[in-house]
């Protein structure tokens, strides 16, 4: 006697129509979950990057250090959240496949890159543009300064200086001091008469031979250059001071209170360019990171689709 025919229902299986409906439902549900994961992976790292970059690069770091430290610390701990979730899912023995541990790992990696990228790029922007701009804004601007009439101690708070008409560099009294880098100085004078004290000096690095009468730093040969941008670096100032002392000995001159400047055409224009450079860098990297992150997310989606994670 032949055994009775069995159907899928006898073993608890779904009928063909029900199985097809379940398959369609799971495919729709998985697509919806992945759309959320894609949006999260796109915008979460971008927001971390923007916040970290802005806090590190802009004047809030200069004016409110506590706020800067708080913002950077907060973004760092936010960055750790997906890292912890990804590690937990990786180490779990009973990971639910619907939780998509692949996207968690990808998000953790992107958050780490976003935080460190925002911090490093923001710090570069701060050092190159924001800090010099803020330093100059905290100092005073002087115009029509005559090297023959003014002394260094009278304008110790100078940030930018426009020297009087007829001011020039006296290349014949230039000097260089060698300490791995060559630190070059040349006195700023007026007219052709000797001054009782040379307190204003144009400076630069590796732009002279180190001997006498040789100085070609910045706008040294421009007839329109009458401005000075104050040297603010504490690291290089002692070396320029040694170069001035060598010039005093070599030429028999005196520099009672030497101030050091970069010799330029328009110092205020350079200060304004620092401000604009900081703003342009901010906009560039905000939109640039969004494009880069979008590329990463699209690439990851294609890769995960190939290996069956979607």
Image (cartoon, rainbow, N blue to C red):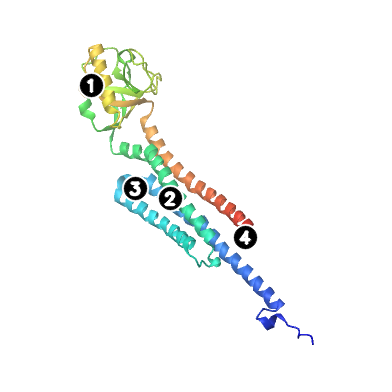
Residues at marks 1 and 4, CA–CA distance in whole angstroms: 80 Å
Sequence-wise, the earlier of marks 3 and 1 is: 3
Sequence-wise, the earlier of marks 2 and 3 is: 3
Residues at marks 3 and 1, CA–CA distance in whole angstroms: 39 Å
Question: Regarding mark 3 in the picture, which secondary structure is present there?
Answer: helix
Residues at marks 3 and 4, CA–CA distance in whole angstroms: 46 Å
Q: Which residue is mark 3?
A: 60
Q: Which residue is mark 4?
A: 308
Q: Position of residue 267 (x, y in %)?
A: 36, 30
Image quarter hosting the C terminus? bottom right
Query: Marks 3 and 4: which is nearer the front?
Result: 4
Sequence-wise, the earlier of marks 3 and 4 is: 3
Residues at marks 2 and 3, CA–CA distance in whole angstroms: 18 Å
Query: Marks 2 and 4: which is nearer the front?
Result: 4
Residue 272 lies left or right of residue 158; in this view the side is right
Residues at marks 2 and 4, CA–CA distance in whole angstroms: 30 Å
Q: Mark 2 Cα within 10 Å, few/some/many (few <14, many 20+)?
A: many
Q: Residue furthest right?
A: 1
Quadrant for residue 237, please give it: top left
Is 168 drawn above or below residue 31 in the view shown?
Answer: above
**Residue in the foreground of this view, choosing between 76 and 168:** 76
Question: Regarding mark 2 in the picture, which secondary structure is present there?
Answer: helix
Q: Which mark is residue 115?
A: 2
Quadrant for residue 300, please give it: bottom right
Q: Position of residue 63 (x, y in %)?
A: 30, 46
Q: Which residue is mark 1?
A: 149
Labels in figure, total = 4
- Which residue occupies 21% across, 28% down? 154
Residue 267 lies left or right of residue 90; in this view the side is left
Tag 1 and tag 4, C-beta contact below 8 Å:
no
Is 274 drawn above or below residue 70 in the view shown?
Answer: above
């Amino acid at each position: 006697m032949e055994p009775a025919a069995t159907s899928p229902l006898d073993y608890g299986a779904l009928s063909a129509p029900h199985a097809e409906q379940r398959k369609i439902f799971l495919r729709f549900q998985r697509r919806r979950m992945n759309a959320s994961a894609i949006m999260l992976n796109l915008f979460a790292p971008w927001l971390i990057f923007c916040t970290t970059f802005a806090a590190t690069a802009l004047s809030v770091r200069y004016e409110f250090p506590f706020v800067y430290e708080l913002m950077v610390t907060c973004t760092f701990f936010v960055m750790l959240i997906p890292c912890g979730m990804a590690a937990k899912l990786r180490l779990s023995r009973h990971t639910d496949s619907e939780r998509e541990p692949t996207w968690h790992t990808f998000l953790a990696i992107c958050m780490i890159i976003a935080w460190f990228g925002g911090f490093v790029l923001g710090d570069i922007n701060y050092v190159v543009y924001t800090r010099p701009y803020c330093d100059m804004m905290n100092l005073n601007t002087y115009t029509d300064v005559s090297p023959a009439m003014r002394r260094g101690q009278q304008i110790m708070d100078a940030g930018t200086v426009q020297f009087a008409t007829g001011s020039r560099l006296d290349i014949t009294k230039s000097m260089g001091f060698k300490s791995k880098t060559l630190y070059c100085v040349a006195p700023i004078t007026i007219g052709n008469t000797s001054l009782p004290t040379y307190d204003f000096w144009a400076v630069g690095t590796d732009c002279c031979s180190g001997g006498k009468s040789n100085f070609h730093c910045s706008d040294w040969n421009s007839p329109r250059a009458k401005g000075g941008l104050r040297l603010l670096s504490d690291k290089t100032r002692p070396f320029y001071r040694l170069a001035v002392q060598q010039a005093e000995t070599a030429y028999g001159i005196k520099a009672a209170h030497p101030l050091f400047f970069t010799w330029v055409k328009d110092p205020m224009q350079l200060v304004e360019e620092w401000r604009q450079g900081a703003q342009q860098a901010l906009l560039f990297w905000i939109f640039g990171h969004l494009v880069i992150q979008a590329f990463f997310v699209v690439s990851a989606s294609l890769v995960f689709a190939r290996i069956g994670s979607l």
